[in-house]
Amino acid sequence: MPLTWVGYSPDVGLFVGGGASGTGYDFRRLPYNSHVRVRAGYATAAQTYRAEFTGEFRGIVPPVVVTLQMRASGIDVLRFYGFGNETLTRARRTSTR
């Protein structure tokens, strides 16, 4: 089944992508044996990509359900501003002069 993936944000710009989703059935398997989804897209302002793979597999070792999720992205931005308030107090300012 084809999928569309569209979004917008000021940092990323227009994000356009697509993918596919599929479900596999085996003999006497309810609700299903496996379900897989693959998506990929491109962001115009960030000029980079994002790709995802999600799979759920039930027939490997019954009754265990194995879930696999993979993601590659150049869009996600982590901003680290320090561990806390690093503002100098009045006592520290005068003692360091």
Image (spheres, rainbow, N blue to C red):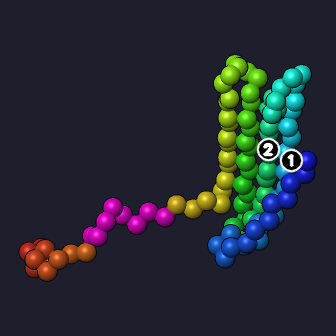
10 Å neighbourhood of mark 1: few (<14), some, or many (≥20)? some
The spot of residue 20 in percent (x, y) is 86, 47
The spot of residue 76 in percent (x, y) is 61, 59
Task: Say which quarter of the image contains residue 11.
Answer: bottom right
Instruction: Identify the residue at image location x=57%, y=62%.
Output: 77
Please indicate whether residue 50 sits to the left or right of residue 94 in the image: right
Disc 1 is placed on an element classified as: strand
Answer above or below: position of 89 versus 22: below
- Residue 90 is covered by the magenta coloring: no
Q: Is residue 14 visible?
A: yes
Residue at which label 2 appears: 37
Instruction: Identify the residue at image location x=67%, y=41%.
Output: 69
Circle 1/circle 2 CB separation < 8 Å: yes
Q: CA distance from mark 1 to mark 2?
A: 6 Å
Instruction: Identify the residue at image location x=76%, y=23%.
Output: 59
- Residue 72: which disc? none
Answer above or below: position of 83 versus 23: below
Q: Which residues are magenta?
A: 79-86
Please indicate whether residue 54 sits to the left or right of residue 95 in the image: right
Q: Is residue 97 visible?
A: no
Disc 2 is placed on an element classified as: strand
- Say what amino acid the circle numbered 1 marks: Ala
- Say what amino acid the circle numbered 2 marks: Arg
The spot of residue 27 in percent (x, y) is 89, 22
Residue projecting furthest to the top: 61
Residue at which label 1 appears: 20
Q: Earlier in the sequence, mark 1 or mark 2?
A: 1
